[in-house]
Amino acid sequence: LFQAVVTRTGFSTQKGQLVRSIMYPKPVDFEFTKDLLRFVGVLALIASVGIIYTIVLMTIRGSNIGKIFVRALDLITICVPPALPAAMTMGVIAAESRLKKKHIYCISPNTVNTCGGINVVCFDKTGTLTEDGLDFLGILPTLQQGGICRVELKQARDFDAGHGIVRAMACCHSLTQMGQQLAGDPLDLVMFNETGWRFEESQAVNESERFDILPPTLVRQPNPNGVEIGVLKQFPFSSDLQRMSVLTRELLSNEVILYCKGAPETVISLCRSSSIPENFDSVLGYYTKRGFRVLALAMRLMDTSLLKAMKMSRDAVEHDLTLLALLIFENRLKPQTTPVIGQLRKAGIRTVMVTGDNILTATCVARECSIVDNSLPLYFVESVETDTLTFQLHPDEITLSAEEESRRPDADQFSVQIHQIKPTYQLAVSGKTFDIFCKRFPHLLPKLICVCNVFARMSPEQKTQLVNILQQLDYIVAMCGDGANDCGALKAAHAGISLSGGEASIASPFTYKLANIDCVVSVIREGRAALTTSFGIFKYMASYSLTQFLSVSLVYWLGSNLADFQFLFIDLVLITLFTVSFGRTPAADGLHPKAPNVCIMSSNSISSLLLQLVTVIFYQVFLFVYVAKQAWFVPHYFSPKAEVHPSYQATGVFLISTFQYITLVVVYSKSFPYRKSMFSNRMFLFSVLFAVGISTMLTLNPPAWIVDLLELKMPPDMRFRTLLLLLALINFLHCLLIEECIVDRLLPCLLKRLSKKRRLTTGNSKRTEFESILEEIGATPAWIVGENVGHRRRFTKLGGFYNNANLKVDDQLNMYLCEQSNYSKL
């Protein structure tokens, strides 16, 4: 019998934390959603004004309480349309359908609109930007004399079976047998296959029973008399430790040997200094700077018995190692990577690499795919701890050869002529340095994140932390990854995009089946189209509600109401048809440099609604008064008992309003630059033409049965009906002129001038948090290696807070942002 102590269960385990993040995700705020609720509140306020108007008017006319109550409730449902939530989903549903045709599947529809505002995309490296498979280039063995020869790559066949390098490659992995195939990490597969050895697992019926057999796994040479080694115990790979180890014993031998494999900088920290060649750093830098993936192999001959070794902890065995060799792998960029990064940069979207790989390898790949801008200087940030902890900047001195320069895209190719603040330098940091910033210098962390495009040796928790901080700096963040170590970041981001069908697909809203990053452009394009559609539908539904609210208010003045079938005609024939077809306009082919507006309560949206509403009021009131001036006009007969009594004025208001609904839907069906032309949406085009035809027929010559059904009182003068049709056309041109000339052109220019003037006079302007930080840090990274007196005074008040280790980094960052806001007001 075996006894064990369970230390963690449920959500306390690593798998449990993943499940918890999926079941109870951190709420992600999006400005569009918050403004949507605020504007619904504004509509409710307008409805309350209408209720007061109805109560006062009908009380004066002696109506009973029941009728007053019903009419007041009518105004509420008119002003705040119950169909608004359903209408808002139409653009999202259409975008989801188009994404599905591109093999992009979405499990969180609410995220689609959020994708329209994305301004930074974080990418994992291996398997996301680069190919899944690795090419094994060779082995750099350590030599007793002369260190490591960096140019003489050897292969496994160059060593005999007794050599520690071959044995480490054959044993130090986490592969398992699934049927007749080996399964596991692609790097482990490539490394093991290079040895040519065979892998055998116990044939126990139950997989859990394999651990009762010693040893459960054997690796052997293919020849009959070859070496056989049993893997006794495995210390699995950990993202935090960046290494794995195995305890092994050769059959018919009493020696227990530990083999270790992992990140070179981690492995050498466990090795004896005498086994580390003097030129180790230069050789490692030679390959990592060229984008190769490098692993270190080490071993230790255990000077203890088998039973004692099996009981020893990981820390007890992973020390005093002997460095064996460096393994060199090549991980090529996917062919889609560089073009996609180029499209994102042209669109003004920042790209960031977040990887667990070596910082030099990550920087090389980032430079190759243009995440690192070759036109800007790049600095590596390194923490140095002597008497005090300081930071050093190491400039990247790699220069491109003439041949590489000719292949590299021009710097101007990715330049974007839009109004935004851009950094004049770039930084690259490792996970160790990032952790020091988080724990000891949180006031510098926002500045670091705003200008750092390469984060290397990052643990899964650090990836999640980075995404959270980017969000707190007002970035709208997308994360693209393919592994289980990306799950936390994928879930935390505004939009997570998984390139695999494993755990990552459960944690992320989007999953792409073709495993390359061109899906990122598609998701952003469809997100922008869906967001533009949602804006248009919302403004249309709001203006439709206010238009009908005005029509009903005018008819209430007569002591009447619109007929039931008039309401039905407006809601079913016009509004429903427009709502269903509005969102089917496909996304534009490219990404425009300027992102769409994500704020409904912006001056542009509010001014558009107000100007259109004033125009609608003018034409309805004008017709309401003009009808009464006609020679054939008969005043409305008010009857307290009759709910609806046909009248010329009510009919005129109804007819002009039907054209106004059509006018508003055309005005708000903007396409450029985020959607294709409305003419590409055949269903919507048919809906508009159908509605125009029906409304024209109702105005000029409606059949008698329709007149009776809609309870209309048609003007007897055909010239007046034609004039009403002409008035509707003038109304359309008037609304179109307001939207195209005033709202889209004149108003932005005026606001830009006012903002510039306010910034020059007061020094204040409305900026996002990251824009303010970019403006503050200047053209050099001197703030990292030393802060001026003003900055020291600025953070003195929070010194005790920053040194409080019991507070989470997110709490420290929130406090810092509050301090920033208060300081800017001084």
Image: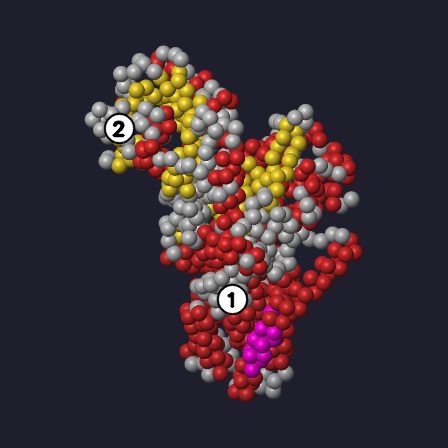
Q: How far across and how far down the image is residue 721, in percent?
A: 53, 83
**Up/down of 520 relative to 297, above or below:** below
- Secondary structure of the residue carrying tag 2 is loop
Residue 221: which disc? 2
Residue drawn at x 40%, y 34% as measured from the top left: 139
Amino acid identity at mark 2: Gln
**Up/down of 1 relative to 415, above or below:** above
Amino acid identity at mark 1: Ser
- Secondary structure of the residue carrying tag 1 is loop
Residue drawn at x 48%, y 69% as measured from the top left: 677
Magenta region: which residues? Answer: 726-739
Q: Quadrant of the N terminus?
A: top left
Q: Earlier in the sequence, mark 1 or mark 2?
A: 2
Residue drawn at x 33%, y 32% as measured from the top left: 158
Q: How far across and how far down the image is residue 405, in percent?
A: 53, 54
Residue 671: which disc? 1
In three-dimensional space, the C-alpha distance between marks 1 and 2, rounded to whole angstroms, equals 66 Å
**Up/down of 645 relative to 129, above or below:** below
Q: Is residue 99 magenta?
A: no
Q: Is residue 341 left or right of residue 4?
A: right
Q: Quadrant of the C terminus?
A: top right
Badge 2: few (under 14), some or many (20 or more) residues near its Cα, within 10 Å?
Answer: some
- Can the viewer see residue 72 in this picture? no
- Front one among 713 and 257: 257
- Front one among 303 and 441: 303
**Residue furthest toward the left?**
224
Q: Are marks 1 and 2 in contact (CB under 8 Å)?
A: no
Q: How far across and how far down the image is residue 652, in percent?
A: 55, 77
Quarter of image, res 90 = bottom left
Q: How far across and how far down the image is residue 406, in percent?
A: 51, 57
Give the mark toward the camera: 1 or 2: 2
Residue drawn at x 35%, y 25% as measured from the top left: 163
